[in-house]
Image (tube, rainbow, N blue to C red):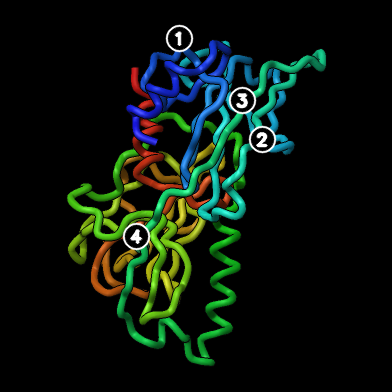
Amino acid sequence: MTWTGRLLMTLLSLPTTCFSDRDPVDNHSSNPLTSQQLKSGEALLLSLPCPSDKCTVAFDGNDIAVHPHPKNPGQSLVVIATPLDTTVSAKRKLVTMTMPDGGNLPSIELETIEPDYPVEPLSVNPDLVTPPEHALERINKERTEIANALKAKNPHQPLTSGFIEPVPLRKVTSPFGIRRLYNEQLKGRHTGVDLRAAEGTPVQAPHDGKVKMAQSNWYTGGHIVLEHGWGVSSSYFHLSDIQVNVGDTVSQGQKIALTGASGRVTGPHLHWGIHVNGTPVNPLQFMADSTLLFSP
Ligand SMILES: [Zn+2]
């Protein structure tokens, strides 16, 4: 939804007690929302009108982590990610808040909409579309390792600032969410964003974090995963030089790698991914919303 759309929604909504930090209204607005839409593949940073140490929050019936709000002490913040899958996400789901005495605050309805993500045909080395027999064991092992790296080990660690871009955002060469057709075979969705970057461009950490993966993989080439807090991880593919090790702590802006063209690629670029509790979300949207959340 555009900001204009969100503003319109804000003006039309009935007065209640919740709002998202991405809405173009002040957090103390007298026009908060009772319901809102979000796109599949988006992360919602949702402010709630109860202190994090006092209320329990559930999304679609399942308890979710509740964090202290970074700016408003009497409030809490939850991060909700919707998957890139219409059949799963195109539903209305409720966020419910329960107080220690068992009382409920008014719930918030979230409706996920599926944008018309386009199809992108790509030509790559045939071995990378239908891998040779001898690579299958390696590919399966790496798939498990990547899934494990994306599992948040410290989901209650707070984020402390908005995210910054890992390389200068000169041009997006392939957007988030599109349907990828490799050599005319559909191979799923693009779970990150491709940024134009000449071979050897320095990559910087977008936020403080811990290194969860730093290795060379069959499909993704030189691959780093960082865990940052609130269940949020970031990923970097196709690197030519990895300059951190698993277990390292990194600071926002620290150089972690050089870009390259390793793995399943058509040329040098940086693939940047953001996952929230293992669900891929649009990195550019997350960067913009986290910056808004932490802005004075
Ligand atoms: Zn990519």
Distance from Cα at disc 3 to Cα at disc 1: 17 Å
Q: Amino acid at mark 4?
A: His
Secondary structure category for the residue under label 3: strand
Q: Which mark is residue 271?
A: 4
Residue displayed at 51% across by 54% down: 84
Q: Which mark is residue 59?
A: 2
| Residue 231, placed above or below residue 273 | above
Distance from Cα at disc 3 to Cα at disc 4: 34 Å
Q: Estimate how packed mark 1 is, as few (under 14), some (14 to 19) or many (20 or more) residues with alpha carbons within 10 Å.
A: few
Q: Amino acid at mark 2?
A: Phe
x and y percent of residue 77 in the render?
55, 25
x and y percent of residue 135 in the render?
51, 86
User: Which of these two is toward me, 219 or 246?
Assistant: 219
| Residue 117, placed above or below residue 282 | below
> Which quadrant of the figure has residue 120?
bottom left
Secondary structure category for the residue under label 2: strand
Ligand 1 is within 8 Å of the C-beta of the residue at disc 4: yes
Distance from Cα at disc 1 to Cα at disc 4: 37 Å
Q: Quadrant of ligand 1?
A: bottom left
Residue displayed at 55% across by 18% down: 18
Q: Which mark is residue 108?
A: 3
User: Which of these two is toward me, 239 or 14?
Assistant: 14
- Which residue is denoted by mark 1 in the rendering? 28
x and y percent of residue 8 in the render?
39, 22
Say which of marks 3 and 4 sits in front.
3
Q: Amino acid at mark 3?
A: Ile
Secondary structure category for the residue under label 1: loop
Q: Amino acid at mark 1?
A: His
Residue displayed at 47% across by 86% down: 131
